[in-house]
Amino acid sequence: MSKTRVRFAPSPTGGLHLGGARTALFNYLFAKQQAGTFILRLEDTDRERSQEEYAAAIVADMRWLGLDWDEGPEQGGDYGPYRQSERLDRYKAAAEKLVASGVAYKCICEAKEKGAPAEVCSCRDNREKIQEDAKVAVRFYTGEEPVTIEDQIKGRVTVPAENISDFIIVKSDGWPTYQLAVVVDDMEMEISHVIRGEDHLSNTPKQLLLYKALGATPPIFAHLPLLTGADGGPLSKREGDLSLGGFRHKGYTRESLVNFLALLGWAYDDKQQLFDIKELCDKFSLKKVSGHPAVLDREKLDYFNHHYITKGEEAAYLSQAAVFLGSRARDAGRDEAWEKGLLMAVRRNLNSLAEIPEKSGYFFAAPDYDAELMAEHKDAAQLLAELVEKLSGMEKFAGEPLEGVLREFVEQQEIKFKVLALPLRAALTGQKVSAGIFEVMELLGREECVKRVRSFIKAAQGE
Ligand code: GLU
């Protein structure tokens, strides 16, 4: 059996959006599942629309998602993506071969009338009249036979010859078109399976004809179902920014996005929803990819995000969470251990990593006490005044001893723990909801806790 080799082949005419990221992930998972090779190839032959910043963003997003590719040109001790703009000689050679064998012909109407429909091209009939030095494109003759695609997901699709018009393979500026470059590369890179979005199904008959004309066996095709909005209609502006970078900035974790993307058209069974990337690599199969459109369900993504933030691997959480905290801890003169403590303390209350700055504000600045909070807790001023005496005398101001002191205090006072904890939380954080009280105290430190409780008491008494 020949080896599995797949590729993700984005055009850098825009960044990576959810649809592209899903295609990339499915290729990656399929390669891993089959112990095959995964390739990243930037299809940058559209000179007008390709941009270097999009290419860089795609590469960065792929790395962020953890979808590392297995080969490519050497780049700083790692593999860079293949780029079609660096492989032009190959497309030129293929086009020459096709012209020489008579299945492609020189065309002057592409040069004359950009985007002219092939139906009006009569260059094939007027071959002799085209002058040697004319500015020409090369057009491929698609023949008179229908083309049948045996798609792994869509099944058998037959397209009549009249629906496949002769198409340009080399533009008049000498650059290959997508149709030619994609086939030449998939042949040269020995791609065994082309897994891509359903929007490319209409390109497949043309590509099958090119394989045949170049004497190659085509790869197996698998076209992934369309993504739709919540209402089942095509994705529209209503779904908002669907770029992967947009989701990352909004505080979605890589684990939540990978899990979410994996379920856009694929399911393992009708029960399991949570999958980490390792499990996906084991369980993914093309056979279980549905041909039906996949609905983007944002609530599901939010659920996954909360799940992975609060219950995912600690190291994965910490490294992604730190990005959202930025340099705040360092700027406040705190060390790495303190920063880690803070991130762990706020973790369980987060729906998104982007909430980190807002939900950790009180660690960096003394809170303002709003009137409502004050009214609710001002009767606890005396209790807090007694507590503050105990706190200021403590030697080791850390989680366990703190818990011991607070529990002993409530016992002596014969009150429930929350009768102390609620006003204490209000005094320390200015919030009704915060990280765990012992963690907050340890992170703030004795001086700061004592200071805050005293100003709270003062404010309460001033009322
Ligand atoms: N370059 C094409 C795109 O970005 C994909 C080509 C393919 O997968 O065959 O849509």
Image (cartoon, rainbow, N blue to C red):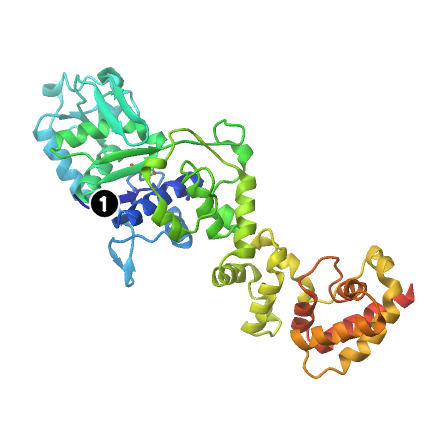
How many numbered discs sit on the rendered protein? 1
Residue drawn at point x = 80 percent, y = 76 percent: 388
Q: Is residue 183 left or right of residue 62?
A: left
Residue drawn at point x = 53 percent, y = 33 percent: 237
Q: Which element is circle 1 on? A: loop
Q: Residues within 10 Å of mark 1 (few under 14, many from 20)?
A: some
In the rendering, at what x and y percent does residue 276 appear?
43, 51
In the rendering, at what x and y percent does residue 453 appear?
79, 71
The residue carrying mark 1 is 4
| Residue 80 position (above or below residue 133) | below
> Would you say residue 251 is visible in this rendering?
no
In the rendering, at what x and y percent does residue 116 appear?
29, 22
Q: Residue furthest left?
A: 101
Residue drawn at point x = 66 percent, y = 62 percent: 435
Q: Is residue 445 left or right of residue 311?
A: right
From the viewer's side, name the closer residue of 369 and 397.
397
| Residue 313 position (above or below residue 36) | below
Quadrant in which residue 269 is drawn: top left
From the viewer's side, name the closer residue of 391 and 359.
391
Q: Quadrant of the N terminus?
A: top left
| Residue 33 position (above or below residue 125) | below
In the rendering, at what x and y percent does residue 273 appear?
48, 43
Quadrant in which residue 360 is drawn: bottom right
Q: Is residue 289 left or right of residue 84?
A: right
> Would you say residue 142 is visible in this rendering?
yes
From the viewer's side, name the closer residue of 419 and 66.
419
Say which amino acid is labelled 1: Thr
Q: Quadrant of the C terminus?
A: bottom right
